Amino acid sequence: MIRIDTVTKRYPDGTVAVDRLSLEIPDRSITVLVGPSGCGKTTTLRMINRMVEPSEGSILLDGVDIREQPVNSLRRSMGYVIQNAGLFQHRTIVDNIATVPRLLGWGRQKSRARAVELMERVGLDSALAKRYPYQLSGGQQQRVGVARALAADPPVLLMDEPFSAVDPVVRKGLQDELLRLQEELGKTIVFVTHDIDEAIKLGTTVAVLRAGGRLAQYAPPAELLTAPADAFVEDFLGTDRGIRRLSFFGTAGLELKTSPIVAVDATAEEAAARPGGDVHYLLVTDRDGRPLGWSEPAALTAGAVDAGRLLPHGRPFEYGVESLRAALDCAVLSPTGWAVAVDGTGRAVGVVSQQTIGEAIRTAHAEGRRTEAGADARTGDDAGSAAGTDAKVAG
Amino acid sequence: MNRFFDIPSDLQHSWLGLVGLHLREALLPVLAGLVAALPIAQLCVRFRWLYAPVLGVTTVLYAIPSLAFFVVLIDYTGQTELTVMIPLAVYSLVVLVPAIVDGVRSVPQETLAAATAMGLGPVRRYLQVQLPIAVPAIIAGLRVATVSSISLVSVGMLIGNQGALGNLLQDANSYHRPELAVNSVVTTAALAILADAALVGVRILLTPWMPRAARRGGPGPAEERPEPSVPALEGALEDGPQALEDAR
């Protein structure tokens, strides 16, 4: 555990970058420091590996003041990932990754073998080992940066806006990769970003800092979205925090309707027998049960199905895997107002209306309030955080 | 034409001997200049306020005519090669110090931060990160310093035949053999071009990590700032070493 104890950083010119900040960063979780520029988040991160020395207060690593060990050995025990990767442009990829093992005195062979192993771990083709950084894309370079930080298997990983210089698609890939790696490795990660969406997606706990280096709120993402501590946090979260909070609710409990689903080779009589109650459309699927599109019942009874004349069904959501946010999004975008739920293989398992999703949201909120009232809700019990992780990966 | 390489005996060297002497008198000062420039440049990087005064001093030194330098030095080092080489070493600083400072400063901030964060101390950071990344800029500076030095050696003839190939100019005059002057100019120019090409080769060997376009001499980080004196030096070379000295 890293304990930041009433730390202040004041520069000679009088500016205060960090003001009496106290944080407890738990092991094996991702703690995100987020805030506008000038809120001292990078300064805080750099105080953990002593690239910046606090003016007041102390930082304890597993109960021991970080100033008690030599600065370079402290740094070698903490991986560091920086914006734009900061690779050594004059060294090959494999030598970049092997930097810290070499500094720690591992042999050349052992360091390189470890580097190649890590390349595979972060999703890089080992054929790139002998390349130089300029030959890699921005996303690949950032993966090298992550591999380099992990090379000596440090228990702590410090990440300073690592993904903010890559395009959104690559960024999403890198974020998903980080969550996957964290499942495997269980590092103590301190992650700095100015992007609240990234913070909510990645963080086990999120510390929101305000300008002047003061802590505004320190809470798990779901709690942050439900109960922002003040107007600043609420403003920083943006206008759609209610919608975004739905990312933390699963779709497993959604009540699906299967009666409007009809296979493309069904007879007119079968089709005619299908609709019931409030469903004004039929979801036509192929012979394997994959959705093709929506049709009015009358059009079906009139004869063979013309796939080209079906209403598009839009993006379906994976039932039980994706979040309520995804389900609601599907329903909103659907021309019929109904979202299509599919299983892992893409077969339609049911359809659900906006109204049903709305009821599920109300139930989820009510349950959320009940758990928050519970004693250990703040620390997040295992079941809760596991469900949260699933939803986050999907969202 | 067979008298072209027939060097008068007062020079006590064959043509090849003169070439060797010329290279020694030109390259040793550049080497000495490099050895001096590295720590000076590092101080300038470390203490930013130092850079402007250092640049001023090297420029003033560069402005001292070599003849004046010789007159001062002759009291201490006599009519020797050393008297020629000391000013050349001093002149090389005006190119080498800014080249190294710019090269070291061109290392991206995040690369330096990453190096620090990985536990590289200041010495390792300098030797393993800053210096290697500054190599293209340093070699660009060395190219200018070397070419300039090769042409300037000829002035050494003024202090008693210490000008290597430059001495041929005097002999051409004394013995009414103009081909010796041509020999002097052509050989000096050829040496400069070969030395320059050799340095380009060294850079290509040392920097496999540079993008190809930059290595071929296109726009690259190290060559974004062409040294203003290069065209002037090249122009002067074509006119012969004496013209260069006059130009200075």
Image (spheres, coloured by chain):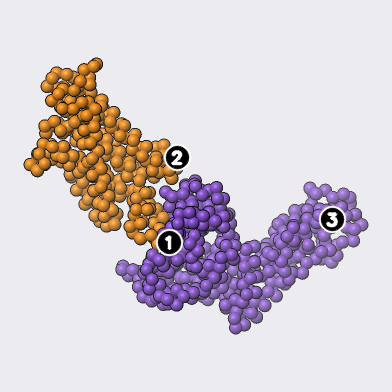
Q: Mark 2: which secondary structure? A: helix
* Residue occupying the point 77% across, 58% down: A347
In the rendered image, which quarter contains the C terminus of chain A? Answer: bottom right
Q: Chain of mark 1?
A: A
Q: What whole-number distance in Å separates the C-alpha atoms at marks 2 and 3?
A: 58 Å
Q: Mark 3: which secondary structure? A: strand
Q: Nearer the viewer, mark 3 or mark 1?
A: 1
Mark 3 or 1, nearer chain start: 1
Disc number for residue B212:
2
Q: Tell me, what hue is chain B? A: orange
Q: Chain of mark 2?
A: B
- The amino acid beneath tag 3 is Ala
* Residue occupying the point 23% across, 36% down: B24
Kindly identify which residue carries mark 1. Answer: A104
Question: The chain shown in purple is which?
Answer: A
Q: Are marks 2 and 1 on the same chain?
A: no
Residue at the farthest right position: A269
A111 vs A157: above or below: above
Q: Nearer the viewer, mark 2 or mark 1?
A: 1
